[in-house]
Image (spheres, rainbow, N blue to C red):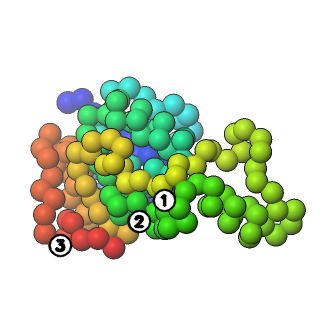
Amino acid sequence: MDKVRFATVWLAGCSGCHMSFLDMDEWLIELAQHVDVVYSPVGSDLKHYPENVDVCLVEGGIANEDNLELILQVRRQTKILISFGDCAVTANVPAMRNMLGGAEPVLKRAYLELGDVGPQLPHEPGIVPELLDRVLPVHEVVPVDIYMPGCPPPADRIRATLEPLLRGEMPLMEGREMIKFG
């Protein structure tokens, strides 16, 4: 049987969802027998998102041009995209900056008003990815196949989502154990 081509992506979030993924402990050994991890920020130095990914967990909202570019590529090259955690599902905490009314007020607040020494806006290309005016949940940018809420989703929920996919089935995302936010 061919292994599932598996990826995880970390956008605008805290990495708590990835930490919860690692909390699956010894089940990760079993998972490793069924998947080829082809892209992940955890224990991987892969720079480019590959083609023909079967399943991808996407953590975080879309906050900047780099996030936007990556999520568009992920969607094009992935069969099953899972919105992984509350930040991916709703934009959650990263979207709190939306209340400031755009990228410019965010940059001014962070770099000028709160700058400790020599407050200035970054002016060299590539230092800070260009911010979007709003942080968006994944589904506002690309179609999502499965929503896995939680801040972070508990390890049991992650496993209960992945196990059916390994058998070629869609997980049943209903009930408090599978769809509780927070």
Asked which secondary structure carries label 2, the reply is loop
Residue 53: image location, x then y, percent: 33, 32
Q: Is residue 123 visible?
A: yes
Residue 28: image location, x then y, percent: 35, 53
Q: Are marks 2 and 1 in contact (CB under 8 Å)?
A: yes
Residue 68: image location, x then y, percent: 47, 41
Which of the 4 quarters of the picture holds residue 61?
bottom left
- Residue tagged by mark 1? 13
Q: Amino acid at mark 3?
A: Arg
Q: Residues within 10 Å of mark 3 (few under 14, many from 20)?
A: few
Inter-mark Cα distance, 3 to 1: 23 Å
The residue drawn where x is 19% and y is 70% is 177
Q: Residues within 10 Å of mark 1 (few under 14, many from 20)?
A: many
Quadrant assignment for the C terminus:
bottom left
Quadrant assignment for the N terminus:
top left
Asked which secondary structure carries label 3, the reply is helix
- Residue tagged by mark 3? 176
Look at the picture and state if 11 lies above or below 158: above
Mark toward the start of the polypeptide (3 vs 1): 1
- Pick the front one: 73 or 54: 73
Residue that protrudes farthest toward the front in the picture? 101
- Residue tagged by mark 2? 92
Inter-mark Cα distance, 2 to 1: 9 Å
Q: Amino acid at mark 1?
A: Gly
Look at the picture and state if 18 lies above or below 5: below
The residue drawn where x is 58% and y is 49% is 131
User: Which mark is nearer the camera, 2 or 3?
Assistant: 2
- For residue 101, side relative to residue 89 (left or right): right
- Pick the front one: 117 or 149: 117
Residue that protrudes farthest toward the top in the picture? 51
- For residue 107, side relative to residue 160 (left or right): right
Residue 161: image location, x then y, percent: 22, 55
